[in-house]
Amino acid sequence: MSKQTTHQRSRQERRREEQQRREEERRRAARRKGITTAGIVAAAVLVVAALVYFAIVQAQAPANAAYPAIDGVSCDSGEHGDFHIHAHVSIYIDGKPVTIPAQVGIASDSSCLDWLHTHTSDGVIHIEAPNGFSITLKNFLDIWGKRFPQLNYPSQLSDATGWQAYVNGKPFTGDFRTIPLQAHTLITLAYNSPGAQPNTTFDWNGL
């Protein structure tokens, strides 16, 4: 074999070795890039998960720790504008009307409002809840009796018997606490008050 042929083969081998070396470097660079990209993606996922967790915790935390949720109804720092209706409740006990006071469902420092609350003492219940939440009279009575009993909550409302309930002027049979609160529902509750007349009209004054 001539020296020229040997020299040519040596150059070819060096080229192959150089190509192999470059190819190996490219593979290593690709692996490093893949590892770096995976690390960035993993870090981004962790950041998003942390933000979601923080948002959930914030959403579940009461606006005021002194006013935890009752029957799934929370005391929020703002009103829910997506669902805002009003109902009216009249109560008679032993033949005498009982006033539902203002501020039921409103924190004493005004830091939060329950989804059901009163602003006035005329019996109007403001219902501002998330869409899809089923509201009954029990929700309001539990807020009044458990959180605001000092606002003249009648003990008779805890009695299972002795009550006659009316909805929009018609007798309601069954547990009056299960009465659904819908837009402009008129509810009359009479305890030991056979002469009480159920409400059939009310001046909502634009509510």
Image (cartoon, rainbow, N blue to C red):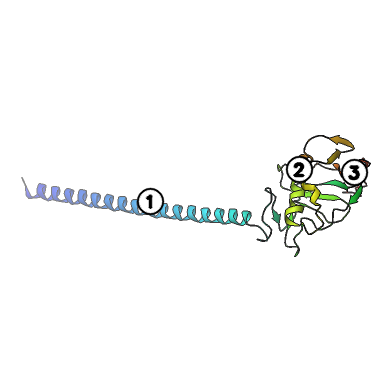
Q: Quadrant of residue 198?
A: top right
Judge the density around disc 1: few (<14), some (14-19), many (≥20) Cα neighbours within 10 Å. few
Q: Secondary structure at mark 2?
A: loop
Q: Mark 1 highlights which residue?
A: 34
The secondary structure type at the circle numbered 3 is loop
Q: Amino acid at mark 2?
A: Thr
In the picture, the disc for residue 193 is 3
Few, some or many residues within 10 Å of mark 3 (<14, 14–19, 20+): some
Amino acid found under the numbered disc labelled 3: Ser
How far separated are the C-alphas under marks 3 and 1? 80 Å
- Choose mark 3 or mark 1, whichever is in front: 3
Query: Would you identify the image quadrant in which residue 65 lies?
Result: bottom right
The residue nearer to you, when weighing 160 against 116, is: 160
Residue at x-position 72% and y-position 44%: 131
Judged left or right of residue 37, residue 103 is right
Q: Nearer the viewer, mark 3 or mark 2?
A: 3
- Label 2 Cα neighbours within 10 Å, binned few <14 / some 14-19 / many ≥20: some
Q: CA distance from mark 2 to mark 1?
A: 57 Å
